[in-house]
Image (spheres, coloured by chain):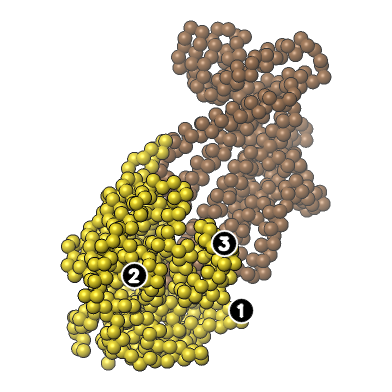
Chain colours: A brown, B yellow
Amino acid sequence: MYSYILKKILYSSLVIYGVLTVVFFLFNILPGDPARMMLDKREDSKQLELIKIKYGFDKPILHQYFYYLNDVSPLSFHETIDEKSLNYLDEKKYNFTKIYDFNHTAIVFKFPYLRTSFIKTGMPVTKIISSTFFNTFFLACASIIFALIFGVLFGVVSALAKDSFFDRFLLYFSVVGMALPSFFSSIIVAWVFGYLLHNYTGLNMYGSLYELDDYGVSNSLVLKNLILPAFTLGIRPLAVIVQLSRNSLLEVLSMDYIRTAHAKGLNKKIVIFKHALRNSLNPVITAVSGWFASLLAGAVFVEYIFAWNGLGKEIVDALNNMDLPVVMGSVLFISVIFIVINILVDIIYMLVDPRIKIE
Amino acid sequence: MKEKLLEFKNLVTEFRTEGKTVKAVNDISFTLNKGETIGIVGESGSGKSVTSLSAMRLIPSPPGIISGGEIIFHQKNSEPVDLLSLTEEGIRKYRGNDIAMIFQEPMTSLNPVFTCGDQVLEAIMLHQNINKNDAKKLTIDLFKQVQLPDPERIYSTYPHQISGGQKQRVMIAMAMSCKPSVMIADEPTTALDVTVQKTILQLMSNLQKEHNMGIMFITHDLGVIAELADKVVVMYKGKIVEQGNVWDIFTNPKHPYTKGLLACRPPLNKRYTFLPTVSDFMKIDSSGKILDNNVSVEDFTKNLIIPDQKRKEKQDKLFTKKPILKIKNLKTYFPIRNGFFGGISSYVKAVDDISFDVYPGETLGLVGESGCGKTTTGRTILRLEEPTSGEMVYKDKDISLMNAEELRLFRKEVQIIFQDPYSSLNPRMTIGNAIMEPMQVHKILSSDKERKTRVEQLLERVSLDPAHFNRYPHEFSGGQRQRIGIARALAVNPKFIICDESVSALDVSVQAQVLNLLNELKDEFELTYIFISHDLSVVKYMSDRMVVMQDGKIEEMGDADQIYNEPKTSYTQRLIDAVPEGKTEDIKKHLEEKGVKI
């Protein structure tokens, strides 16, 4: 299994390299000049020149590409004397360990450097991602856990009470849930629970996980702000999980080994929860993992409407402003997330179903 | 007077679906005594499985419902109890404890996500008041009793890691775990190779003697239970048509259906012009009543025997011709890939250097246990698998060197009939279109209208109603679907047909019909067959010459009768011995061992 994970990581680095290359060229051939965007309305050709030199926009695109690659790669080459060089080994920029030192150049091992935001001047992209990603991660976990618990629960109940009123009701409910676009559901949820029923629920229409207190002095954790966005985000995965776990459980319940379990004299509860449920989880794991990964990439609409300070919102802002380092950094980060989750899911499959052996 | 164990009294089990009620079991009564084995025999749909599931109260409900009768269980130390009157909770105490069951499909009857040991342990812990360590010891002990190799290892393996026969042994161990007084075995050997079947039957017979259980053994094949059963119950369409002790049933069957079942198994020591089927002994009139043709098995089969001389003459003529297919040093290896770049680390040698010829008009039999490479051989000849090396010459052309156009023509001449009639037909295509499709591909006849007429003729030829052209596969029984498969193969006017386990999934009574059909078609269309099966009796019956395969290699090859009469290798001998013939000498021996006087 370890060799499998190692292999997977090696493959993944190739994938990440591909993503990086595509993203870099894609955004650099887009029309629009980030240098001008940074200057905003202050047209000044001298300033423009300086900015171009500072960020290396004056260099041919292939040079820019290699500099960027060098910055992102954990193993990289750096100029140690000329401070003006784009890859000068700046302690403010890189968090590194020197491996080898030549005359001018050093080979270092470092944490990938994603550069700084164009718009929020000087703010490192890593910091932007880490601060917003935490919020997104928290929101994604909350909604997936909500969807998983209730989805499997409803799915099981629905399967056991097949064709009953409750089963039919859940079926219609989940069809509606799947069809509901998130920008619509988030507005409805925010309006109903945050505004109309505010006096009963005590929930706000919008707000982030950390908010400035009334005096504007310190950040405080506002957990209740999580409830509405998590619920809204969870509706669709919930609907899908209900359907999947219901159908999968029904299929498993018709298997021969379930008959064997009954023939042993086991009671219904043990047959369902021990023998059937575990076998029926595979499709649910597939659905949940895919969903979770895409939630981690940011749920743009929901984050926007609830003013949740997450990665999705950040990426949209950055795209609007041509803030290339943030966009590229986020896309890279998201692809890493997808890869990590895929590996985790493979391991979970193995734990749930011994027939799946990874080689 | 023997001690009664399980009494079925006027049992009726129905399946109710949308205004239609089918009586799967219709008013049957019989008694299982202590230490006795009852064989319940009948074709699929006769209600034999439903009978056994009724006793366990495992009828899937809805739509199934037990609507009448009693099943009285005589317990060891207390009053007899009617199993049908118990509550769901009440019946659970008996399931797995006093009455245990083994199922047909060992492949799917064990839960794939738990180890074999855990699944047996679970049953023990449920019914017996002992701790986990003792239960584990007991489980390993049981694995020893059912002769599983390396019981400690099997304890911690998952079902998919062991073979079908071993899985069935685990199931038997599970059934034996609480020393039940009744064991119900629902076709426990049908899905297994004949050689494995033999060992499982042996095991069950030994366990029965040791523990003095009552066994209900359900099967479609009378031959299987000849050496095991004391009594036989023959079921047909939900009713018992005949019951009696095993000797009487085998030597003096009364009911025409029983006669049909006895006669339809391909005989090993003689050759028939055609195999007798149930319909040779009875007719069913329009009201569903059974009419007896009043012939005995001996009288009927006497006239069918082909004299050796006649067969020899025919064969001499056969082998003077030039071979239609020459296989020389054929190898088909499957690579096992691993390593970072998916490098090939080793090979599975499915077919390992085999050579044989097939003469026009001949039936060549390929026989061996599962995994011996017989199916891969068939598939390689059709280029459904690519050969690793070797020559395959069909009518002077090397099959492995054919270009796309030549291959298309070749596949028109050479057809295959698959094993599983259930999954080899597309469920969303009407059978008419399924048969017509290859004709369209190979541009046989000029219009779809003509093709349709031809399909209808073919359907009629394989004894199906041409009016069923627009029906879907799920509306047909297994035997009928196999006929559809045959019609589809015939649609392109082939010269050569590979039958890959074409009758293995069928009941013996249906098997006989399909074998007869194949033989008739062979004469009618001047076909050449390669007939592949794991059952030596079927292969021997069908073939002129026989190839015995093991581990991808040819063990033995030659005239089918000669191989049967003088097998050269112990492997061939084992295949022959494993055939459940139901010979009267064997029954006599088995009854004498039990101390029964005939």
Report the residue at 48% width, 45% height from top: A346
Amino acid type of the residue tagged 3 in the rendering: Ser
Chain under disc 1: B
Report the residue at 21% width, 66% height from top: B563
Amino acid type of the residue tagged 1 in the rendering: Glu
Q: Residues within 10 Å of mark 2 (few under 14, many from 20)?
A: many
Q: Quadrant of residue A57?
A: top right
- The image's mark for residue B189 is 2
Residue B151 visible: no
Q: CA distance from mark 1 to mark 3?
A: 45 Å
Q: Position of residue A175 (x, y in %)?
A: 69, 58
Report the residue at 36% width, 40% height from top: B344
Q: Residues within 10 Å of mark 1 (few under 14, many from 20)?
A: few
- Mark 2 or 3, closer to the camera: 3
Is mark 1 in CB contact (under 8 Å) with mark 3?
no
Q: Earlier in the sequence, mark 1 or mark 3?
A: 1
Is mark 2 in CB contact (under 8 Å) with mark 3?
no
- The image's mark for residue B446 is 3
Q: Position of residue B41 (x, y in %)?
A: 37, 81
Q: Position of residue B496 (x, y in %)?
A: 38, 61
Q: Are marks 2 and 1 on the same chain?
A: yes
